[in-house]
Amino acid sequence: MGKIIAFILLNLCMVCQSAGQENDEEIPRSMNEGTLLGFGTSNIKDTYLSPFNYNGWGARILNERMKTISAGKGRYSRQQIINVDITSTRNPAENVNDFGTFIDYSLSYHYRIPFGSSIKLLAGLSTHLMGGFIYNTRNGNNPLSAKVDIDLGISMIILYGLKVKDHPLTLRYQTELPFGGLFFSPPYGISYYEMFNEGNTSDVIAFNSFHNKFAVKNYLTVDIPIRHFTLRLGYLNSLYYSETNDINTHMISHSFMIGWVKEFIVLGGKRSNNKSRVNSSYY
């Protein structure tokens, strides 16, 4: 386990070091920032709390920032996504609720491959952090199941620019797939009181990969310029499955997103709306 933790920390340090090497000597670069609200359906099952599927609704707010960096003469970009997800679900008998709150943070570095003037492929690695909980209104001794994950994964984006009746649109498909990391998963039957008050923390941290966890996000958006601002419409599908310590968990959500986008240039820590000096990090 020590070697696994060291491997994860080493990769995180390498990512942070790359981010820290950006300084004021970078060439002028653009940043694309979008803030979206989402609403849709949610399906949750956590056998630590209940053997049943719980269905209901989910709401989220998502902030995304993408900018070019100096490495590779502007062929690399950095993307950060912060996502807050709130869910409310009910069991099949509709007499018990599960409430969930989750916070996700993703940091990705992509290599940009243009295909002609309208298509861009971005591919690279990502680091993903997730924390949150599911609360069951019926359970007395163990009403809560905490979720904490840290992953390394692959990330891919396809951008496609087109015009519809002389109106420019930008389509985006993005997927993120973690391939290894660590997550918090207490053994079935061990209460949080035993873990944190009696020190029974054996096997509560597990290594995860495809043998015990599968998680993927699919993100579709379209950017529509409207006068002095850009509207972003989207669909976000999140799938999360895990099986460890005799506990099965799945969290599935479908969200329809709407928000706005800002595109600006970062010069010495300041922002400028003059986009003529550099290529866009997104469009």
Image (cartoon, helix red, strand yellow):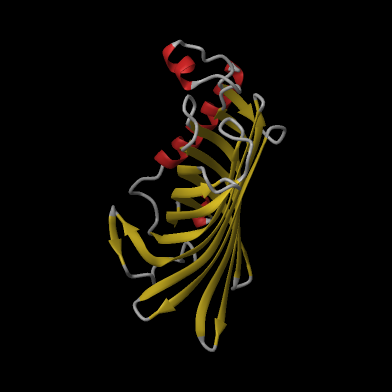
Does 171 appear above or below 189? Answer: below
Q: Nearer the viewer, residue 4 or 29?
A: 4
Q: In the image, residue 7 lies at what x, y percent?
A: 58, 25
Give me the residue at 46% from left, 60% from top: 38
Does 23 appear above or below 234? Answer: above
Q: In the image, residue 117 lies at what x, y percent?
A: 59, 73
Which quarter of the rendered picture does the N terminus lie within? top right
Residue at the extreme top of the image, as rendered:
198
Q: How many marks?
A: 0
User: Within the image, what quadrant is residue 66 found in?
Assistant: bottom left
* Relative horizontal placement of residue 136, taking residue 206 as reference (left or right): left
Give me the residue at 57% from left, 78% from top: 162
Q: Nearer the viewer, residue 113 or 80?
A: 80
Q: In the image, residue 47 lies at what x, y percent?
A: 61, 33
Give me the residue at 57% from left, 65% from top: 172
Residue at the extreme bottom of the image, as rendered:
165
* Relative horizontal placement of residue 12, taking residue 262 as reference (left or right): right
Residue at the extreme right of the image, as rendered:
211
Q: Nearer the viewer, residue 77 or 105?
A: 105
Q: In the image, residue 133 lies at what x, y percent?
A: 47, 36
Q: Is residue 229 visible?
A: yes
Q: Is residue 33 visible?
A: no
User: Within the image, what quadrant is residue 258 found in?
Assistant: bottom left
